[in-house]
Image: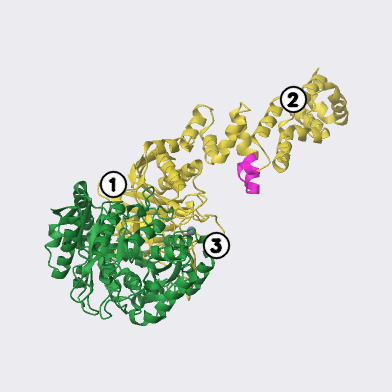
Amino acid sequence: MTTKYETVIGLEVHVQLNTDSKIFCGCSTEFGKEPNENTCPVCLGLPGTLPVLNKKVVDYAIMAGLALNCDIAEYSKFDRKNYFYPDLPKAYQISQFDLPIAENGEIEIETEAGLFNIGVTRVHLEEDAGKLIHEGSIDKSKGSLVDYNRTGVPLIEIVSEPDMRTPAQAKAYLTELKMIMEYLDISDCNMEEGSLRCDANVSLRPVGQEEFGIKAELKNMNSFSAVEKGLEYEVKRQQELLDEGKKVVQETRTWDESLNKTISMRGKEEAHDYRYFPEPDLVPLEIDAAWKEEMGKEIPELPREKYKRFISELGLPEYDAGVLTGDKDLAVFFEEVLSDYDDPKNLSNWMMGEFLRLLNENGQAPFESGVSPINLAKMLKMIDQDIISGKIAKKVFEKMYNSGSDPETIVEEEGLKQISDEDELENIVDGIIADNPDAVEDVQNGKDRAIGFLVGQVMKETRGKANPGLVNQMLRDKLMD
Amino acid sequence: MNIYDLTIHELKEKISAGELTPGEIKKAFADRINDVEDKVKSYITVTYELAEAQLKDYENKKEKMLAGIPIAVKDNMSTDGIKTSCASKMLENYKPPYNATVVEKLNEAGAVILGKTNMDEFAMGSSTENSAFFVTHNPWNLNHAPGGSSGGSAAAVAAGECAAALGSDTGGSIRQPASYCGVVGLKPTYGMVSRYGLVAFASSLDQIGPITKDVEDSAILMNVIAGHDPQDSTSIAGKKEDYTKYLKEDVSGMKIGIPEEYFNLEFDEEVKASVLAAVEKLKEVGAEVETVHMTDASYALAAYYVIAPAEASSNLARYDGVRYGLRSEHASDVNEMFTNTRHEGFGEEVKRRIMIGTYALSSGYYDAYYLKAQKVRTLIKDDFDRIFNDFDLILTPTAPSTAIELESKSDPLEMYHTDIFTVPVNIAGVPAMSVPCGFDSSEMPIGLQLIGPHFGEGKIIQAAYTLEKLLNINEKRAEL
Ligand SMILES: [Zn+2]
């Protein structure tokens, strides 16, 4: 007999902040440098060195806290989390234990099943560790190399409430977090590069039971799809155990992408005792109302608000609003065009069509192409004013994309201006009529479709420049009277 | 008087009068080291190359406060390219790539650094017998310990192996050896002197301070090393003063509290008599001395031996053999490397404190030990604050006895007890100085401790200077 279970998921998300320098020293945080190039006595934890808090890091954490609707702590402090590992040069990580910088937040997410509010328990600051390079596992490899470039790169850990009930919700929550961080411009949020990392706590309980089931902690899910797949696997695994009358054990499991399954890493007994205690080398962090307010002003319109506004105020379909707000730069670009152009839906079509196609083909971000918002607005207006046809516009757009020129120049230089002058078209239309007696006859016999053929021939003759509406009208006038 | 017996201010006078050159001074001290170092063994490393380089720069620094003055530095303060061992096998060959802020300040002030002095391993101990390398001898009697943990610095000053030295004080490590060696030792207010580059023992208690032949030198050295350092978040801005302005023979109206609970403890009668005699002298020149009541110092000692080891267990965790220092050659995997490196590299006392500290921070024990100790710490701070509402200074003995004989205390608890008068000061974060006040019947020096409120260094210096002039024993030197 299969019992009905409810899944309970909570996520712990680490977000690398994109400050120029590290959290406790002046070293650069730039990615991709030579190993150990971005290090100094402080981040190497040399004897006698002391941490000095980077204010920018606190600024960013306050912004994150506010954006997640948290209370910002007036008084918070740093603590040491003690454990031995070769990538941790002080053998402790400076983190925050009982007084995190932000608490009690929530965000709204949307899945196919509807809208949900997910609680954010806390946001705390900490320093990243280095990276080990070895063959296989550290236990079996002959030797290991350590790169401390990442040591001391600032992180915030965002801990959710156990509010998610499906892997899809977890994925939507993670996506929403990523978008918020991107809108705040405080992180690159690249899961593959490790600037966004996600661990999950998963448990099952019989439907209607209040008490949580025994949870497994899931690690090493290095992409959005890995998060969803890992969670789905884990839910199924626990369900099967429970169905068989077995017990779920409290443990840490790792997602193995190649095997497509979760594997036990360590049990409850092997869990670390981190021996947290207040970091004596740093003074407590006090955040007054003025600082909080100042950071509040730095927060732009967030993705959910923008999404809702695009629908309610611009009349965009939900799908369009979702695509456009799903990428901050795309949304910003969209709005910049709209300041010069007033047909949101037409613009949306162009952006989701031609623009996204070319961006994807070239692997570029919205502001990296040759198309500027002003030029796109100009081009759309040229279509609306019948200066160019929609078809020609695609050519013009591609040239804008590649060259960065403005559409007027392109149309001028390439002679792409739409021909809307009847005198200019007269000879061409007459020529086409003369050359296509069969089609002419069809038209005259009432086969309306043949008109399209003739228009097409004129378009071909003019290399697309003829105003198709005008050509259509002229043909009708000439053949149907 | 021999050149090596002179104080900083005396040497400065001779230099400016053209009677001595920095080169002659350096040579006199180097000769002295040559003559007595075999007996005293103050230095782990002598740094004559650095000293020569600093002498060469003398012309550019001659207006500075310590121009041409030979100074010794405890071997737990980082010196760029020069071994900084903390008297531990773990760091036997460790050369930092940077200077501690205090070392930078000495450089900047024109000092000539003669060497790095012996200490208890990682500053854990009260006799310098915990050095992994060798024992330092008390210049007043070579069979006695110099005290600790800054025993090398105190012995070097007392033996004329330097004009003055820097020590570090976590629970008495400047004051107690100063007392044992008959010199002046000041532990400044927590945060007055940058800890950047001081190899941490217990971060919330550690302070660097001067060990000098007299009070005036203490004030001069404080002028050099005190002040805010942006590299140390716990260092304090805006409180530094010109300490030499307190070099005044005047204690009239100064209110000095004598804590009855401290004097009621069982300790050496000769020490007690000497300290109380000094109190009488201060009274005679107008100090208002009164008995005060304070929390039993043994609570402070108990709190100290939880807090200091707890922080130490974390501070010393970085010595794992991965990046620098000792790495065990007997290991087949990374965990064995950690374990064996630490097993081989640390001495017994260091291991004992790491174990105590780890235990105190462990889940299930944290509240009963670490948290309780922090509460006691708050009470002790309040206790000092309360006294300092009404008093300028508190006066106690520095140590319960004169210098102990070498190898006389094998029980660690007995050794811990030698810090009973000094530990509460670190717990409260206030400043205190040990000043010589006499000698016992074996001609061993006795020190008394003047404790001031936060940033009360000036008052301490003023009272100590007055006392020094009254007692007139500061020119007496150990005979070697
Ligand atoms: Zn660094």
Q: Quadrant of residue A466?
A: top right
A73 and A306: which is toward the camera: A73
Marks 1 and 2, Cα distance to the nearest angstrom? 63 Å
What residue would you read off at disc 2?
Answer: A469
Element at label 2: helix
> Does the rendering let one see residue A445?
no
To which chain does the residue with label 3 belong? A
Which mark is nearer the camera, 1 or 3? 3
**Relative height, residue A60 to residue B342 (above, below):** above
**Relative height, residue B420 to residue A57 (above, below):** below
Residue A43 place in picture, x, y as percent: 46, 60
Chain ID for yellow: A
Q: Is mark 3 within 8 Å of ligand 1?
A: no
Q: Does residue A315 appear to the left or right of B3 in the view shown? A: right
Q: Residue at x 45, y 44 (%)?
A: A60
The answer to whether marks 2 and 3 sit on the same chain is: yes
What residue would you read off at disc 1?
Answer: A207
The residue range painted magenta reads: A355-368
| Chain B tint in image | green
Work out whether mark 2 precedes mark 3 in sequence or the reverse, and give the earlier one. Answer: 3
